[in-house]
Amino acid sequence: MASGRRPEHQAPPEVFYNEDEARKYTSNSRMIEIQVQLSQRSVELLNLPEDKPCFLLDIGFDCLILDSTDVAIEREVEGDLFHHDAGQGLYFKPGTFDGCVSISALQWLCNADKKGHNPVKRLYKFFSSLYSCLSRGSRAVFQFYPENPQQVELITMQAMKAGFTGGLVVDYPNSTRAKKIFLCLFAGVVMDKLPKGLGTEETNNEQNTVQYSGQRQRTKVKRGKSIKNTKNWIKEKKERRRRQGK
């Protein structure tokens, strides 16, 4: 993403992506190259079967989708996030698509561009309707530019509440320019293992994937032990110190 003020902070998407801005995605060779690379990587993360055609949903304004063999994947759906407000839900028949990809678009749903916009409700509406229109066992991959960790948590929490499992895949985590973040979601399957992030061979890859299950994590406490930093734990610690003469 270009440096400077974030696009989603400048204007609503239907205003920001005017004719001049949209033209950059078909005339600027550097931008085209980046979008092709991001799209190829997203399709790779979908892990599509090689022995049958797949029907994909492309959510965004700037996706040129190519598979790993540089064979163009037919863009079946001409609608996108900005002409069809995804915050109001996706209206397709259940199980219509075998996968979903989205490039540089998801963070826009975190904005409240209009009166009455609630990012939490809009994200949940989007993810729950997406879950419905995906076939069971399929994946959805979102490349996006989160503004901060709180935004990542907001997005992933609503995706998990909608029924997805999955998590974050981070490519080239140690590079400022090459680092890319993908939200890889699984629909209707027991949590699958997340793909490895690129450029992580020399680091602990577990640090570059963050997995979510949609289930609350419970703190395990040994029988007879108080949870650390609770009132009872503090009292017990003081009593032990008193007995030890401290």
Image (cartoon, grey):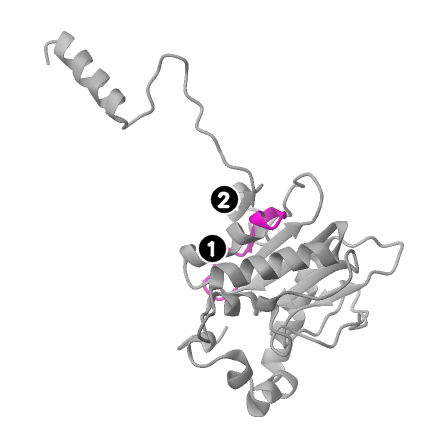
Query: Which residue is at 60% across, 68% downward?
Result: 88
The amino acid type, in three-letter code, at marker 2 is Gln
| Residue identifier under label 2 | 207
The amino acid type, in three-letter code, at marker 1 is Leu
Position of residue 192 measured from the top left corner of the image (x, y, whole percent) = 67, 41
The furthest residue to the left = 245
The quadrant where residue 57 appears: bottom right
The furthest residue to the front = 116
The furthest residue to the right = 51
Position of residue 50 measured from the top left corner of the image (x, y, whole percent) = 85, 54
Query: Which residue is at 53% across, 57% downward?
Result: 172
| Residue identifier under label 1 | 154
Left or right for 75, reference 84: right
Position of residue 236 measured from the top left corner of the image (x, y, whole percent) = 23, 16
Q: Which residues are magenta?
A: 161-178
Q: CA distance from mark 2 to mark 1?
A: 20 Å
Label 2: few (<14), some or many (≥20) within 10 Å? Answer: few
The quadrant where residue 73 appears: bottom right
Disc assigned to residue 213: none
Can you tell which of label 2 and label 1 is closer to the viewer?
1
